[in-house]
Image (cartoon, helix red, strand yellow):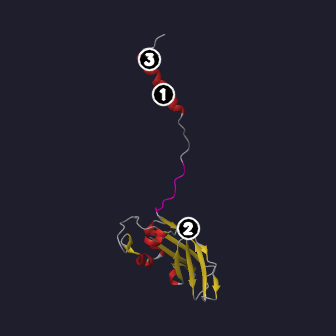
């Protein structure tokens, strides 16, 4: 028999709805991810394993740091820290630059201590990629983030750096 134009449209609409509803997939919602700041990477704490180099008269270690790229070296920031217990029994976190020379290279951090063997001391680094606003403006020239120069970032306490970069 002959279908009217309205019947054909109604039939097509019903078929579309059946097919569309058959293709939907529902599942449980995923877990909420941790809050963080884009373009900031940091290592976990790891104990140093320095070795003495008689040629340089220094304790040395090279840390693999894949997040250090040429772009980071050119316009970003790398902060290095050590953690220790002071004589009063309190845990302290300080810039590693206070106790050793840090030399940055693509994918690595070279550590040189001319006085102390820091083997066993926990070490961590934070990499901030340049050119990204992190809760503030990115300035031209010597300013990196939020109007602070690299030297000002390095002079901040560990707690302040974590706070400003949104690291938990």
**Residue 54 in the image: above or below residue 152:** below
- Side of 112 where 5 appears, left or right: left
Across and down, in percent, residue 156 comes to 44, 77
Q: Is residue 32 magenta?
A: yes
- Which residue in the structure is indicated by mark 1? 16
Total numbered labels placed on residues in the image: 3
Residue farthest to the top? Answer: 1
Instruction: Read off the residue under disc 3.
Output: 7
Tell whether 141 sits left or right of 112.
left
Distance between the alpha carbons at the discs numbered 1 and 2 = 51 Å
Cα–Cα span, label 3 and label 2? 65 Å
Q: Name the secondary structure under disc 3.
A: helix
Q: Secondary structure at mark 2?
A: loop
Residues shaded magenta:
30-38
Identify which residue is drawn at 35% across, 70% down.
Answer: 140
Rendered location of residue 36, percent (x, y): 48, 61
Q: Tell me which numbered mark, 1 or 2, is placed earlier along the sequence.
A: 1
At a point 42% along the width and 78% down the height, the residue shown is 151
Q: Is residue 52 left or right of 78 when viewed as pictured?
A: right
Q: Would you name the residue on which mark 2 appears?
A: 66
Q: Any magenta on residue 47?
A: no
Q: Nearer the viewer, mark 3 or mark 2?
A: 2
Q: Earlier in the sequence, mark 3 or mark 1?
A: 3
């Amino acid at each position: 028999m002959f279908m009217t134009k309205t019947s054909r449209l109604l039939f097509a609409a019903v078929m579309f709805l059946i097919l569309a509803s058959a293709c939907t997939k529902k599942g449980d919602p995923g877990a909420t991810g941790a809050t963080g700041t884009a373009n900031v990477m940091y290592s976990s704490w790891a104990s140093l394993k320095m070795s003495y180099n008689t040629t340089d008269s220094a304790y040395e270690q090279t840390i693999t740091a894949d997040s250090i790229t040429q772009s980071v070296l050119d316009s970003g920031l790398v902060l290095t820290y050590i953690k220790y217990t002071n004589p009063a029994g309190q845990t302290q976190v300080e810039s590693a630059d206070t106790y050793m020379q840090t030399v940055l290279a693509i994918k690595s951090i070279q550590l040189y201590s001319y006085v102390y063997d820091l083997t066993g001391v926990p070490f961590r680094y934070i990499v901030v990629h340049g050119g990204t606003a992190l809760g503030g403006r990115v300035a031209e020239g010597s300013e990196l983030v939020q109007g602070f120069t690299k030297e000002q970032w390095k002079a901040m306490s560990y707690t302040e750096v974590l706070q400003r970069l949104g690291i938990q």
